[in-house]
Image (cartoon, rainbow, N blue to C red):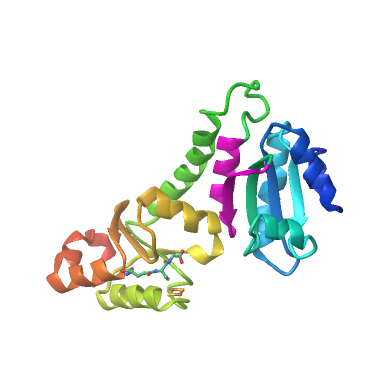
Amino acid sequence: MSASKNIVQIKEEKELRSTLEETSQAAVLYFWASWAEQCKQVESVVDDLATKYSKTQFFKIEAEEFEEISDAYEINAVPTVIIAKKAKILARVEGANVAEVVSQVASNCGAANGVGGKQPSADTKPEFKQDLNTRLKGLIERAPVMVFIKGTAAQPRCGFSRKIVGMLNEQNIKYGFFDILTDEQVRQGLKEYSDWPTYPQLYIKGELVGGVDIVSEMIASGELTEMIPEGSLAK
Ligand SMILES: N[C@@H](CCC(=O)N[C@@H](CS)C(=O)NCC(=O)O)C(=O)O
Ligand code: FES
């Protein structure tokens, strides 16, 4: 996928500088390191975007190899994606936040191929979001009681997730779970979709209930069991 000619792995600092100086368009700078596992996810998205946005220049920059550039863009973590127009930074996405990379490229880099070179894309951004939102909705509705946690129900990988799983088990509630550590797009996307910034997240019949604090209060007041559909309570 990285065969697009508008994407280059920079070998010299001046490659980046001269392109940015010459063009009046936004360029995408992807900073990576070979040791950072998370970069692979972002790299494949960047490759994919380069084929979709063939008029935009994409650069891959090995962060530690090009310290001067990394310092200039204040890179503190890899992966980081910067969208820059000449010296100006239009957007910065740190970490494997794939949904945000897609969304920022869509809103800053004009039209994708086939959209006809129109003005910055009122229509490309929602299109990507639509896909993710459909997916998130499907996950939320996978079971009548659904919990999004770090790790699995059998092996939670965070104290908060362990706590909610323990509470649900204690209440004999049958539930489905999704391990958000396996999917960065879901991890970040669901926060925005449900307007809830942390995990765990408990959903009943497709509706967000809340995290540990809320669920524990609702158990104490008896409210939670009232909300659980009959088939989701083990006798
Ligand atoms: N008070 C929260 C605690 C949950 C929390 O703080 N979660 C953090 C740490 S596990 C979180 O999900 N941060 C965002 C992230 O890791 O993506 C609750 O009631 O659920
Ligand atoms: S992963 Fe650190 S508190 Fe949950």
Q: Which portion, as a residue range, is magenta?
A: 87-108
Corner quadrant of residue 124: top right
Q: Is residue 25 above or below residue 66?
A: above
Q: Is residue 48 magenta?
A: no
Image location of residue 120, percent across then percent down: 57, 28
Q: Residue at x 41, y 50 (%)?
A: 192
Image location of residue 119, percent across then percent down: 58, 23
Judged from this view, the residue extending furthest toward the left is 221
The residue closer to the viewer here, 172 or 49, is: 49
Corner quadrant of residue 208: bottom left
The residue closer to the viewer here, 184 or 119, is: 119
Q: Is residue 199 left or right of residue 106?
A: left
Q: Is residue 42 above or below residue 214?
A: above
The residue closer to the viewer here, 180 or 174, is: 180
Image location of residue 111, percent across then percent down: 62, 28
Ligand 1 quadrant in view:
bottom left
Q: Residue at x 65, y 62 (%)?
A: 78
Q: Is residue 136 above or below residue 75?
A: above
Q: Residue at x 58, y 44 (%)?
A: 102
Image location of residue 176, percent across then percent down: 39, 63
